[in-house]
Amino acid sequence: MTETLGDVLKERNWKRLREIYIKIRKGELEVEDPDPPGDFATYLTRLDYALWYWTSLIILFLAALSVYTSNTIIGMNLLRVILGSIIVLFLPGYATIETLYPDDKDLSNLERLALSIGLSLAVVPLIGLVLNYTPWGIRLNPIVTTLTIYTTTILTIAAYRKYQTTRKKSQARSLFENMRQQTRGEE
């Protein structure tokens, strides 16, 4: 019988858990989900898969909210600056990087961070340039609206691409298991 990670957790053997963690980090051991999401809606509702998506959306909408409430609520200016910096300097690039590289093994976390900041510094001015040639111009409302729409759209595309890679991995695993069971049956 195959031992699961849940079985090891129930034992509360911390030394063994640390050994397993080290093996996972080195790539010697791979943890697989016995019940992967079957469709995109399920993927989005499972926080073990889509926490990054919901966290990004919450930060995005809190930033947009802080822009419009900073004049009415005292003390919101600091929050507006912090969240505004994140929405301008990080989130558009992060969403784009997650879309381009949906598999977690494609890039390390440090590479994702650096590319997210660099790509945000490229995408946001381009959005500003496009806004300059529209009737709305480069003002606060069009910039906040456009950045929110762009980032939300790209984040949703990234979530769908991550769901597709998860689905392909689970299909490949089940195909491999079927082939392994067939070869065992032939013996």
Image (cartoon, rainbow, N blue to C red):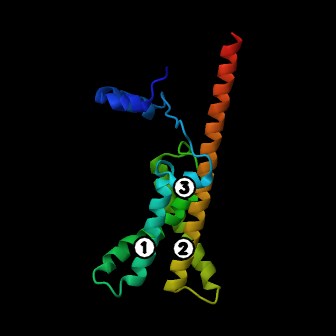
Residue 146 position in % (x across, y down): 57, 77
The vertical placement of 125 against 141, above or below, is above
Residue 63 is labelled as: 1
The vertical placement of 8 against 167, above or below, is above
Q: Which residue is mark 3?
A: 44
Marks 3/2 in contact by CB < 8 Å: the verdict is: no
First reached walking from the N terminus: tag 1 or tag 3: 3
The vertical placement of 81 against 42, above or below, is below
First reached walking from the N terminus: tag 2 or tag 1: 1
The alpha-carbon separation of the residues under discs 1 and 3 comes to 22 Å
The alpha-carbon separation of the residues under discs 3 and 2 comes to 22 Å
At 30% from the left edge and 27% from the top edge, which residue is drawn? Answer: 13
Which is in the foreground here, disc 1 or disc 3?
3
Q: Amino acid at mark 3?
A: Leu
Q: Secondary structure at mark 2?
A: helix
Q: Which residue is mark 2?
A: 147
The vertical placement of 73 against 176, above or below, is below
Q: Residues within 10 Å of mark 3 (few under 14, many from 20)?
A: some
147 vs 11, nearest the viewer: 11
First reached walking from the N terminus: tag 3 or tag 2: 3
The alpha-carbon separation of the residues under discs 2 and 1 comes to 11 Å
Which is in the foreground here, disc 3 or disc 2?
3
At 44% from the left edge and 32% from the top edge, which residue is drawn? Answer: 24
Please identify the quadrant where the C terminus is shown.
Answer: top right
Marks 1/3 in contact by CB < 8 Å: the verdict is: no
Residue 41 position in % (x across, y down): 59, 55
Q: Residue furthest right?
A: 186
Relative to 81, is 152 on the left or the right?
A: right
Residue 99 seen by the camera: no
Residue 128 position in % (x across, y down): 57, 78
Q: Amino acid at mark 2?
A: Leu
